[in-house]
């Protein structure tokens, strides 16, 4: 079973973001694997442990993404591939998906797993676009997954609850929280990961797809409506003031 | 000519508010580009909503008769209508359904897509979409360079504006194709009465609610306001409520008009999910809690006293 796991490198949530003209200022940023992709890596490893085969971790971006790939190695990935895009635009989902789909096609992958969204762009697009590019099934927001032989059974989160769905390989999956608890790489794994090879592919190797997005510009978030703490003698006083503020000032209720 | 297609969404046979929001947004874009707005509705008996969408700016309504939602067949139906109508701009709800089929549509019709847009404007004959990025710590503006541009639009981000379009309905029957994924069963019992990601008011509880037996305190307020019930990760991880209620980086992103945070400290991962709420009310015992940095109205007090008082007060004024 050939399993591709998608590993997107994103700024750590706690990192201070400084906005540049068309991208963020990368100085001082701490990079992490997007949290949902950790569920994807874990699921890939579990599937391999149960069914055999290999787990290929794939990350798109400049050379800094190799650090995330080493982490995937340390968790237990068998191969790591960097799709080397130096001026990578994290919001260009169609381009990203086309590169990954072309890679997956060449590898003849059975399963592609990524996070339900990346925490820098929140687009929820890439994995399903890969599925469409390959003409295969997809299951989004998976909270449980069982694969035996070529049959696939999963529970997915839908509006208001969950659904049980079935399909057969090949399939693309997006991982939702609840699918598993990602393992921590151990020290031995981290040391070994340092020496493992990272394969690189260029866009030219993968069909050189065109971007369909133009970044007009980035800006800081809009200022919030200035806030204030209410003053009152008791709960009833707070309640009266809040109701008044929300109805007469904010006019939201 | 730059025509706009919006893809509406239904829930339990009713038109969702997001459908009207994106129809109004589509109207604005079409007026700026000199085009027409077509609204697409998929489902059974959907013709009856033609008037509703006409009243908020749709020039025509295309209806497609179909059974239950399935991402693959929906993608085929939407792509089929796009190929027939050839719009230059397509607006789709950024809802769990929208996120499930829109990626396939983009690839099928060779379109660029910007997901989770909260602002749509027109510049030089092209739509510029604004979206929060990096957990709301920055905003990005994007244009799409392909002939068809698809945007998924965050619920509650667009105003519904009454503006009469012709609203003429026509039926279409594009091919739904076969789905590779079969739906075996659905369990829709664990969710909110009001859908969290699309709610215009959310009452949310954190570790400060002390235990699962206290949700009725918040649900009482939510019921009076017609609000959805949200939760912090601490409350979810403690097993007090299901993950489908979680707001934040590893939960849902919400943008309600009003977010009432009760006993929630305001950790950065929580703010990542609710920081773009228009008005934020914080009720917290600790006057130094970080939530007060983003709160429009802060109440330093015990939620077990303040929330019931607030419920009573709203009951009085809302009757
Ligand atoms: C990778 C990662 C992802 C995460 N994703 C999320 C996410 O999606 N969503 C999320 O919410 N968190 C997330 N977190 C967790 C986050 O960091 C915080 O731990 C969490 O938000 C804290 O929840 P809380 O505010 O309910 O609890 P606490 O931080 O414990 O705060 C409880 C608050 O309740 C107040 N309080 C107590 N009693 C009362 C009372 N009687 N009346 C009024 N106030 C009272 C206290 O003063 C305190 O401020 C994530 C963390 C990580 C590392």
Image (spheres, coloured by chain):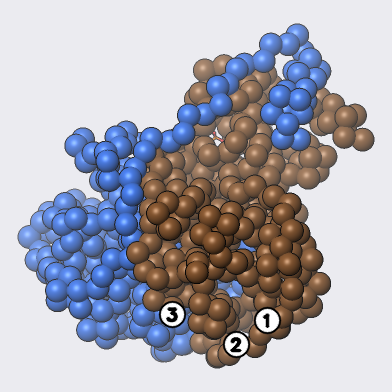
Q: Is residue B97 above or below residue B231?
A: below
| Quadrant in which the C terminus of chain B is drawn | top right
Which chain contains the residue that carries disc 1? Answer: B
Query: Circle 2 is placed at which residue position?
Result: B174
The label number, if any, that marks residue B64 in the structure image: 1
Residue drawn at x 30%, y 37% as measured from the top left: A19
Q: Are marks 2 and 3 on the same chain?
A: yes
The x and y percentages for residue B168 are 74, 73
Question: Marks 2 and 3, how far apart in space?
Answer: 14 Å
Element type where label 1 sits in the image: strand
Residue drawn at x 56%, y 26% as measured from the top left: A225
Q: Is residue B63 above or below residue B287?
A: below
Question: Marks 3 and 1, how far apart in space?
Answer: 19 Å
Label located before the other in sequence (3 or 1): 1
In the image, A95: left or right of A220?
Answer: left
Element type where label 3 sits in the image: helix
Element type where label 2 sits in the image: loop
- The answer to whether the beta carbon of the residue marked 3 is less than 8 Å from any atom of ligand 1 is no
Q: Are marks 2 and 3 in contact (CB under 8 Å)?
A: no
Q: Are marks 3 and 1 on the same chain?
A: yes
- The answer to whether the beta carbon of the residue marked 2 is less than 8 Å from any atom of ligand 1 is no
In-front residue for pair A30/B92: B92
Q: Are marks 1 and 2 on the same chain?
A: yes
The x and y percentages for residue B169 are 74, 76
Task: Using the rendered image of the protein, determine whether residue B214 is visible from the camera's viewpoint.
Answer: no
Q: Residues within 10 Å of mark 3 (few under 14, many from 20)?
A: some
Q: Is residue B111 above or below residue B163?
A: below
Query: Circle 3 is placed at which residue position?
Result: B108
Label located before the other in sequence (2 or 3): 3
* Chain ID for brown: B
Q: Residues within 10 Å of mark 1 (few under 14, many from 20)?
A: many
């Amino acid at each position: 079973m050939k399993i591709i796991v998608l590993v997107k490198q994103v700024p750590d949530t706690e990192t201070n973001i400084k906005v540049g003209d068309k991208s963020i200022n990368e100085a001082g940023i701490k990079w992490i694997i997007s949290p949902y992709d950790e569920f994807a890596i874990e699921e890939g490893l579990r599937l391999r442990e149960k069914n055999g085969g290999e787990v290929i971790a794939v990350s798109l971006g400049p050379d800094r993404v190799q650090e995330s790939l080493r982490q995937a190695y340390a968790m237990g990935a068998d191969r790591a591939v960097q799709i080397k895009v130096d001026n990578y635009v994290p919001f260009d989902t169609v381009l990203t998906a086309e590169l990954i789909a072309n890679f997956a096609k060449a590898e003849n992958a059975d399963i592609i797993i990524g996070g339900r969204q990346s925490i820098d762009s929140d687009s929820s697009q890439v994995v399903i676009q890969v599925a469409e590019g390959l003409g295969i099934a997809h299951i989004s927001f998976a909270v449980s997954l069982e694969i035996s032989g070529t049959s696939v059974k999963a529970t997915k989160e839908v509006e208001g609850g969950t659904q049980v769905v079935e399909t057969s390989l090949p399939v693309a999956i997006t991982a939702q929280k609840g699918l598993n608890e990602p393992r921590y790489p151990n020290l031995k794994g981290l040391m070994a990961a340092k020496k493992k090879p990272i394969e690189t592919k260029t866009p030219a190797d993968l069909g050189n797809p065109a971007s369909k997005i133009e970044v007009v510009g980035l800006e800081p978030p809009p200022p919030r409506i200035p806030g204030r703490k209410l003053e009152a003698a008791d709960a009833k006083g707070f309640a009266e003031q809040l109701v008044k503020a929300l109805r007469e000032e904010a006019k939201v209720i | 000519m730059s025509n706009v297609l919006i893809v509406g969404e239904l829930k339990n046979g009713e038109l969702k508010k997001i459908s009207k929001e994106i129809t109004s947004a589509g109207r604005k874009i079409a007026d700026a580009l000199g085009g027409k707005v077509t609204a697409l509705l998929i489902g059974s008996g959907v013709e009856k909503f033609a008037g509703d969408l006409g009243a908020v700016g749709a020039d025509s309504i295309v209806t497609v008769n179909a059974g239950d939602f399935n991402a693959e067949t929906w993608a085929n139906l939407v792509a089929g209508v796009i190929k027939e109508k050839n719009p230059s701009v397509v607006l789709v709800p950024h809802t769990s359904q929208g996120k499930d089929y829109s990626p396939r549509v983009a690839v099928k019709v060779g379109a660029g897509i910007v997901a989770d847009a909260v602002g749509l404007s027109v510049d030089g004959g092209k739509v510029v979409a604004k979206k929060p990025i990096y957990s709301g710590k920055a905003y990005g503006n994007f244009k799409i360079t392909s002939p068809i541009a698809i945007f998924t639009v965050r619920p509650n981000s667009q105003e519904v504006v009454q503006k009469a379009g012709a609203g003429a309905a026509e039926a279409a029957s594009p091919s739904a194709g076969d789905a590779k994924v079969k739906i075996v069963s659905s369990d829709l019992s664990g969710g909110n009465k009001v859908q969290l990601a699309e709610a215009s008011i959310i009452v949310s509880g954190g570790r400060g609610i002390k235990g699962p037996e206290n949700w009725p305190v918040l649900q009482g307020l939510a019921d009076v306001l017609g609000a959805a019930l949200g939760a912090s990760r601490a409350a979810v991880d403690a097993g007090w409520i299901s993950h489908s209620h979680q707001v934040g980086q590893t939960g849902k992103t919400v943008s309600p008009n009003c977010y009432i945070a009760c006993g929630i400290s305001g950790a950065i991962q929580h703010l990542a999910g609710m920081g773009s709420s228009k008005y934020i009310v914080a009720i917290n015992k600790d006057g130094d809690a970080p939530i007060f940095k983003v709160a429009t109205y802060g109440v330093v007090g015990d939620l077990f006293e303040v929330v019931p008082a607030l419920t009573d007060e709203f009951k009085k004024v809302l009757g």
